Image: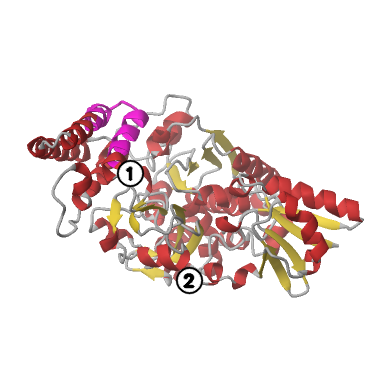
Amino acid sequence: MTRVFVPIDAGALSVGAELVARAIATEAARRGVTVELIRTGSRGLYWLEPLVEVATSTGRIGYGPVAADAVPSLFDAGFLTGAPHATRIGQPEGLDYLARQERLTFSRVGLIDPRSIADYRATGGFRGLERALEMDPGAIVETVVESGLRGRGGAAFPTGIKWRTVLGTTSDRKFVVCNADEGDSGTFADRMLMEGDPLVLIEGMTIAGLAVGARHGVIYLRSEYPHAARTLRAAIAAAREAGYLGASVAGSGRAFDVEIRMGAGAYICGEETAMLESIEGRRGQVRFKPPLPAVAGLFGQPTVVNNVLSLATVPIILERGAAFHRDYGMGRSRGTLAIQLAGNIRRGGLIEKAFGLTVREVLEEFGGGSLSGRPIRTVQIGGPLGAYLPESQFDLPLDYEAFAAVGAMVGHGGIVAFDESVDMAAMARWAMEFCAIESCGKCTPCRIGSVRGVEVIDRMVAARARGDDDGVEAQARLLRDLCETMVSGSLCALGGMAPYPVRSALDHFPEDFGLPAATTSRAG
């Protein structure tokens, strides 16, 4: 029986993957051909979706993008044996886009049935957990510390240090919470992983539970991810049935289980303490710190709070050792980064690569330049609170410290490209408006400052329109003062980082505000 692989990933579904899968099943039945249709995650080659693959004697052969009405012609051409067709791309691994990557966390995504324990085990799944079960909790924690793993959710705090704090805090109850509230613009790596390899997240959470003495885990998932929720629930049920979750993990006598809690669309709940408030049934508002969640988190108990990708990277660290992970990357940025390339770009998708790749390499060698064909003027990296980088900074390496040195952040690894038609004054205004809409309202600099920021930018634009240079300059000074207040006085990163895109736009693209053009790009 020939195996045919069609993604069930939300990105692929949005461009017709479900219709393609149905068309393949219908056409095979009409022709009396028996095929095994396997629904996988996406490989992250989004410009080729829907991507259909078929297992042949020489490996999996891909065809894409495939439209439902092209399926009969695929059968006519003999695609079940890997025959030539207008959409044939050959073996996906041979494409430069994939061949140049270092896929560790995403090694299975797009290859396996995400709900299958058998597929997961056949590709190395649960080896990290098995190794962890042979170790004492302190040794697990120190392995993660030595690996150099840092949080992939944005703050980049060392994962092992957080675990060490939870382990060292005495309590009868501890928790592991996975922050899957992926709300940043241009980001989709968490969703891709949860839809394409949810068992690696479950395994990582279980290892975290063993490391710190927690028996219960919570995945806080954004409501906009129904496909991920469905796949995660199926994977959790399969893991329980196979004995990898429950009262005795893998027969060890040590308990750990996982549940899903759905968010309700609030961006602020991506902040860890607001997320904990939401899980506890209250309005998502930021808590004062200290105490840190590692000491008093969910229901006042010591809690590990990590991002999806942080936890999903843990199994390979336990399986292959701390040095294996640490050997990737540069400086203090160790391991690989899941780069999500979106916006005005020819080849958008997911790129997993060791830290140190430059922004220009991502845009040109992977992305292929802008979709419009115009020069890329700027990129925003790190979500809606990320700084805008001008072309003069495209040779900056993707490294936490290198970005911090120029007033930017890597964040969750999302890169959104804009060509020369972008109006940076409008983008700065949008950043302030976004903060005003999404603010939890607890602190004045964020709640009021963002509203005033929108008003100041509007006055700048109005002054520019009437040729009032002095008015533009006056409003620019006021805007910078306001940004400084928000950075210094906000309770959390929403208000504290909303000025990043505003200040970077002012620094690098002053002409869009009616200010004199900069002779050199400032650091921001």
Dominant SS in magenta: helix
The local crowd at label 1, few if under 14, some if 14 to 19, many if 20 or more residues have their Cα within 10 Å, is many
Is residue 278 depicted above or below 20 in this figure?
above
| Position in image of residue 333 (x %, y %) | 36, 63
Residue at position x 58%, y 63% from top? 107
Colour mode of the rendering = secondary structure
The question of residue 366 being in magenta is answered with no
Q: Is residue 387 left or right of residue 478?
A: right
Q: Is residue 191 left or right of residue 325?
A: right
Q: Which residue is mark 2?
A: 324
Which residue of the protein is positioned furthest toward the right in this rendering? 32
Q: Is residue 52 left or right of residue 198?
A: right
Disc 1 is placed on an element classified as: helix
Q: Which mark is residue 385?
A: 1
Q: Which residues are magenta?
A: 428-454
Disc 2 is placed on an element classified as: helix
Q: Is residue 22 left or right of residue 157?
A: right
User: Do labels 1 and 2 touch, CB within 8 Å?
Assistant: no
Q: Amino acid at mark 2?
A: Phe
Image quarter (top left, top right, bottom left or bottom right) of the N terminus = bottom right
Which residue of the protein is positioned furthest toward the bottom in this rendering? 58
